[in-house]
Amino acid sequence: MVHQFALKEVALQSGLSLATVDRALHGRANVSAQTARRVQAAMCELAQQEGQLAVRGRRMFVDIVVEAPRRFSDELRHAVLKVLPRFTPAVIRPRYHFAEDIDPIKTVEIMARIARRGSQGIILKAQNVAPICAEIVRLAVLKIPVVTVFTDCLGSGRLAYAGLNNKNAGRTAAYLFSQSVQGRAGTVITTTSRSQFQGEEARALAFAGEMARLCPNVSLIDASGGAGLALGTAAKITAAVQGLDRLLGVYSMGGGNAAILAALSAIDLRPDLYVAHDLDRENRQLLRQGKVEFVLHHDLSADLDFAFQHITAFHRLRPPMPEGGTADVQIITPANCPEL
């Protein structure tokens, strides 16, 4: 059977062996459904990159390892494809390793497998826990730079961090609530996907501190830990609001907003104010429907551009990069929400 791409190219893109790719592409035995999907995904990624591959220049493999709900990973993939043409004549080949909910040890195994196969860099969104930080240190020794994105791994020796100024985001959310609350007493629900995501944790801590100053009559109830996924997040919310008959608001830092709103609606609670994060398709729809008042947003493309710049500078394909600042938060309302 003739295929558009050489077996070696598909193997490099998928992270599988030549023999495994050959079996999958020719429909032979002993190929799991998961492996077959990886091969097909690699073929699709190569097709998307084909225009850039025609450009002559140094070829680099950069692995993108992300723990996040599918809705966020889809936005990230689109942002990567938007950014890559800016790096010609270098040809950057992204390899994606996405998971919605993954044990940190599995993340370490993915990073170790990447190192064995070879990589010019890793862009990482992962939990800030000791095993992952230790693996980043090991990769640095192997000259494989790691740039953390959207949530940091502090003290890990990563090359750089690219993402939102999360403390400012938390303080901005508190300001929005203070304007809505206007001195009233009541309850605000806060939710992060995981406390181990340093970025979300920084938002939560900054929000709590500023709310104590601006809205001392408001109590905060935490409903975190649903990984940003619909079922887990809805369960956390339902448990947290038992006994409440009024809700001043929700500050959702980890996503799953349609599920949160559905869980609240099921028990006849409607928050006076809802502040969410990230301008994905779901949040755009909720804004337009008037179910979410504000989305705190930052440009994923700019963050990824910054990350790729650091990796290419590490390999001396551009001048050294300054440490740089974090992205500031943008407040999106139904009035300035971009089209889907």
Image (cartoon, rainbow, N blue to C red):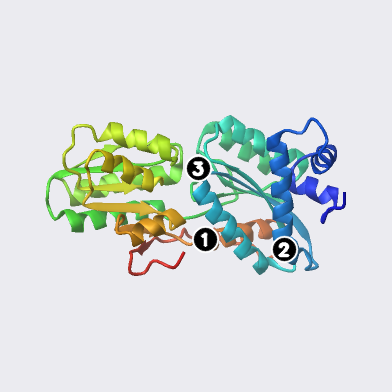
Q: Within the image, what quadrant is residue 202 found in?
A: top left
Q: Secondary structure at mark 2?
A: loop
CA gap, disc 2 and disc 3:
27 Å
Is residue 22 left or right of 183 when viewed as pictured? right
Q: Amino acid at mark 2?
A: Leu
Q: Local crowd at mark 3 within 10 Å, few (<14), some, or many (≥20)?
A: some
288 or 204, which lies in front? 288
Kindly tell me whether residue 316 is visible in this rendering.
Answer: no
Q: CA distance from mark 1 to mark 2?
A: 18 Å
The residue tagged 2 is 317
Q: Earlier in the sequence, mark 1 or mark 3?
A: 3
- Residue with the mark numbered 1: 324
In-image side of 247 versus 206 (left or right): left
Q: Secondary structure at mark 1?
A: loop
Answer left or right for 116 relative to 242: right
Residue 19 in the image: state x and y as whole percent.
85, 38
| Disc 3: which residue | 154
User: Within the image, what quadrant is residue 57 found in?
Assistant: bottom right
Q: Which mark is residue 276?
A: none
Residue 288, position in %: x, y? 35, 62
The amino acid sitting under disc 3 is Leu
Which callout, 1 or 2, points at the residue further toward the start of the chain? 2
The one of 312 and 30 positioned closer to us in this rendering: 30
User: From what the image shows, is residue 311 above or below residue 337?
Assistant: above
